[in-house]
Amino acid sequence: MEFFAWCMIAAGFGMAIGSFGTGLGQGLAIKSAVEGVARNPGASGKILTTMMIGLAMIESLAIYVFVVAMIILFANPFTEQVLQLAAK
Amino acid sequence: MTHPFLILKWLEEQLHMHIGEHVTYTWFVMLVLIALAFAASRAVKEVPSGLQNFMEVVVTGVENLIEETMGPKGKTYFPLIATFALFILVSNLIALVPGFYPPTANLNTNGALALTVFIMTHVVGIKEHGIGYIKHFMGPILVLAPLMIIIEFIGHLARPLSLSLRLFGNMYGHEIVLMIFFALVPFLLPVPMMLMGVLVACIQTFVFTLLAMIYIAGAIEEAH
């Protein structure tokens, strides 16, 4: 049972730390993009397109963490072994 | 998830086989797109109206995007890129219809799409440069070439992984969040999440298409 408790803790903390870093990164990216648009409104299209690509790249980091958390929670490869050990 | 296509259940029982949900809906999306193209191109007029007008706007938009991302040589790959864009967009937006399951919320569909991009990239590179395509992998200095080839190879292998996982994680995460919200409060609370889902669907379509374009354009251009 301790194993499953640690799984929950790992998934939660992993998601928290991953979201923290991703949030910081996206904030910095949007800050720079908005400054660029404020300086040169004519180039807003290209700047915002590049910003979108960058944001998606940063976002995918958090999503990798999410996928790993989902694997830990719902599709853990070690569940059967742990249950067999616990039954002994 | 519910299955709106009841005939498929019967078909599965008759054939003694299991048809995955994502396969069903992939076929459904394909049929929708074929029907749209067929209906829009029946009576082509000089001054378009109605459905033909709408489809012309969509196709012209994708065309302009390709032109400004890939340059004049990108016109050749317009069918591939536009198919990606339309297919992924319809697949993502189908998630908002109750009872429908987005095919892109399954890793297998996205794996197939990303693998297509990966293979196409190298086919285009070899077609454009012949044996000189290896210069793309060798880096700037000839002495470092053995090291650079390994690094570039791993980098190229990571591309389909990141492409497929990004789309899958976004769509599947959206599904999971919606399910959790519906389980908590099935009234009005999921609506803002569904609105966010529209945004996510459009952005992920844009990103996938743009990255496919950038990869193919990178294979077209000269090594530097």
Image: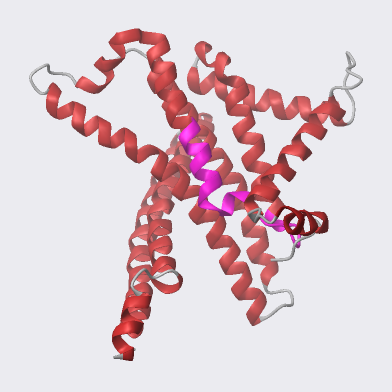
**How many marks on residues?**
0
Q: In which quarter of the image is the N terminus of chain B?
A: bottom right
Query: Which range of residues does the magenta coloring cover?
Result: B95-116
Kindly indicate the quadrant of the structure image that contains residue A2: bottom left
Q: Which of the pair B6/A63 is nearer the observer?
A: B6
Residue B144: in magenta span: no
Report whether B25 appears left or right of A28.
right
Report whether B31 appears left or right of A54.
right
Kindly indicate the quadrant of the structure image that contains residue B84: top right
Residue name at image x 13 percent, y 25 percent: B146
Q: Which of the pair B214/A82 is nearer the observer?
A: A82
Residue B51 sits above or below residue B165 on the image? above
User: How far across and how far down the image is residue B86, in percent?
Assistant: 66, 35
Q: Residue furthest left?
A: B143
Residue name at image x 65 percent, y 48 percent: B23
User: How far across and how far down the image is residue B12, in percent?
Assistant: 73, 56
Residue A84 sits above or below residue B165 on the image? below
Tell me, yes or no, if residue B33 can be seen here.
yes
Kindly indicate the quadrant of the structure image that contains residue B162: top left
Residue B111: in magenta span: yes
User: How far across and how far down the image is residue A33, in percent?
Assistant: 43, 43
Residue B87 sits above or below residue B48 on the image? below
Tell me, yes or no, if residue A41 can be seen here.
no
Q: Which of the pair B11/A77 is nearer the observer?
A: B11
Q: In which quarter of the image is the C terminus of chain B?
A: top left
What secondary structure do most residues of the magenta stretch adopt? helix
Residue name at image x 78 percent, y 29 percent: B55
Residue name at image x 63 percent, y 54 percent: B20
